[in-house]
Structures are given as C-alpha cells and as structure tokens.
Amino acid sequence: MDILTLVENIGEAPTAAVLGLITGIIFGVAAQRSRFCLRAATVEFARGQLGDKVAVWLLTISTAIVWVQGAQALGLMHTADARMMAVPGSWSGAIIGGLLFGVGMVLARGCSGRLLVLAANGNLRSVVSGLIFAVVAQMSLSGILSPWRDKLASLWITDGGRNMDLIATLGLPDLSGLAFGAVMACLALVIARKNRIGASRLIFASGVGFAVAVGWVLTYGLAQVAFDPVQIESATFSGPSAHTLMFFLDRNSVLEFDIGLVPGVVIGSFLAAVISREFKFQGFDGESNMRRSMTGAVLMGFGAMLAGGCAIGAGVTGGSIFAGTAWAALFAMWIGAMATDLFVDQRGGAAATA
C-alpha cells in the first residue's frame, strides 16, 4: 500500500481512519472465525485444561510477537517509537486495572474485543455490555472516574519517563523477542494438535495476531510521511471504543486510527458471520445474567483504562512490543479471571460459555 499517495489524495486524518478500518476488518474476520477469547482461555486453564481455547490464544499472541518482531528486524517499524513505549507506564495501574479487567471479563463472559465481535454477530447481551464498556471507558478517560484512574495510576510509575522495554532491560539480543514468539507458537501448535484443531481455525487464530502487526506497521508507515505527529499504535478496544462513541456524539471530533478500527472489526466480524451462516439474533438470558454482564462491563471499562489497555491492547498488542506494563497487566488479567472463575463460577455452579 502506498500510504503517501493515500495521504496526498484524502489527507492524513482520513488516511489514519482507513488504516484503522483495514486493521479492524482483518481482526474482525479472524477473531470471528477462530473464536479467539482471552476469557475462554483463562477459564479453560483455571479448570486444569490445555484445550482448544488456550491453543488459539497462545497462537494469536505468538503470531503477533513473531510478525511484529520480524517487522522490526526488517526495518518496517520501530517499537521504541510506539505510543505505549514512548510514555511512562504505570505498574500500579497495570496490576490493579488488570485484576479488575480479569474479574470483569469473566462476569461479562467475554473481553471487550470478544464482546464487539459477538455484538456484530447479533448477540444483544454483548451489544448492551459493549456500550456500557465504552461509556465507562470514556468516564475513566476524561469524565467523573478520571481522577480515580489518575490517582491509582500514579502510585507506581516506570522510571526514565518511558515504559520498560523488557528485551532491553534484560539485556537480551535483538532477535530474542522473535525467538520467544517462535517457541510460543510451537507450544501452541503442540496443544492444537493434541486437541485436533483444524487448520482453518489455526490460520484465523494467526490472523488475529497478524492484524496487530498490520496496525503497527501501517501507523508507523503513516508517521514517516505525515506532516503532523502521528501516534504509532495498533489494535486495542478501550480507548478506541470511547473515542468512537464520542465521534458519533461530538460534532467536533476528528478522524483517527481508532475511529476506523472499531467499525472495521464490526464489519469484518459481521461479514464472516453472514458468510459462515452463524449470524443470528440472541436475546437476553435472564435478569441475573444481565446484571452480571453489566457489572463485568463496568469493571472492564475502568480496568482497561487504568491498565493501559484491554485483553487485546495490553495482552497482545502491548505484549508484541514487550512493553513491561503490558505484560504485567496481562498477568494480572489471568489472575483476576482465574480467581473469579474459581470463586464465582465453579463454586457458584454457573455455566461458562464462550
């Protein structure tokens, strides 16, 4: 893709939105067909299983790492310039926010990205939960909850005015990230073979990770030709959900990568569901379950903004560039999700659904 030509024809802001749309469509198709979901993987792992959901998650994050680290080795992007890496990170935000997000995604039966995919497939519960997530994320970003987010995030900040680059901090070779991703991919394929996962699902699981790399490379490419500063970013659904919501509510909002990303996921997931004949409207399944889902959406909205990203933004996108707080948030999400499944679902007898 000739990004410079696109910028000259339609302008920088619309180009950023188009790049977000492309990234979102790839993500939406791949996530719908692979049934990628961190919540499902954590629940499966918490119950002592290494099944298809764990395999899909491992393959997704390992593919993202391989593609992103490979792109850096080829000079297609520079992870040190990424927005997540170029600003101070919050260890306290990552830990507390990650725990809250992990609890919330189990209660809501899906992380923010999964809710968006399910909503595009006709799941009305996910539509409601997704809207609540976006509203609370916006409240946490610049609304009534933002002072609490700032206070918690300021408790423990990374040193040096930047996030921690785990590879550089540990003094590892430049290609160690690529090697780590390759090892994870091999582990994922071993688990996938044990569970007899079809090649098609594995390809689409890899596609989710590939979408993350596409976002990084495209925004980096735009930053090289744009006159105004451009944030180098990729797939995440905390900030973008809030920004997309405000774009349709505030006439002064401007186009950016985020504004294309969320609609792109909806379009991609919807088309994939229609083509595979999986699109169908699903109604609410009881007052208690709706109350549970809404509570989970609130926790995810605040937790994601505090942690600096959602299960995708921190767990896959941030993890692929080895941002220290992203890996801390991901670990906290696993802990929060597994604890919630143990004490709420397993002991409470609730059925878990993907």
Image (cartoon, grey):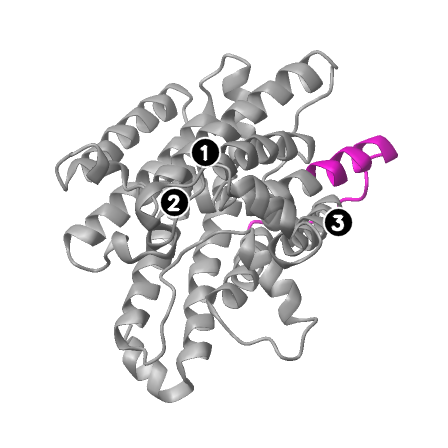
Q: Identify the residue under disc 3.
A: 128
Q: Identify the residue under disc 2.
A: 318
Residue at the left extreme, as displayed: 173
Q: Amino acid at mark 2?
A: Gly
| SS label for mark 1 | helix
CA–CA distance between discs 3 and 1? 25 Å
Residue 222: x %, y % from top left: 32, 71
In the displayed structure, 108 sits above or below 349; it is below
For marks 2 and 3, give the one nearer the viewer: 2
For marks 3 and 1, give the one nearer the viewer: 1
| SS label for mark 2 | helix
User: Viewed as shown, does residue 73 lie left or right of 8?
Assistant: left
Q: Amino acid at mark 3?
A: Val
Q: Judge whether residue 278 can be spotted in this image.
A: no
CA–CA distance between discs 2 and 1? 9 Å
Mark sitting earlier along the chain (3/1): 3
Q: Residues within 10 Å of mark 3 (few under 14, many from 20)?
A: some
Q: Judge whether residue 166 can be spotted in this image.
A: yes
Specify the segment rendered in magenta. Answer: 276-296
Q: Considering depth in this image, is 105 or 307 the residue closer to the camera?
A: 307
Q: Residues within 10 Å of mark 1 (few under 14, many from 20)?
A: many
| SS label for mark 3 | helix
Q: Residue placed at 35% from the left, 23% from the top?
A: 193
Q: Amino acid at mark 1?
A: Leu
Residue 313: x %, y % from top left: 46, 47
Residue 165: x %, y % from top left: 28, 42
User: Given contact means CB atoms under 8 Å apart, are the residues at marks 2 and 1 in contact?
Assistant: yes
Which circle marks residue 330 in the picture? 1
Q: Considering depth in this image, is 224 or 276 the residue closer to the camera?
A: 224
Residue at the bottom extreme, as displayed: 9
Residue 78: x %, y % from top left: 23, 56
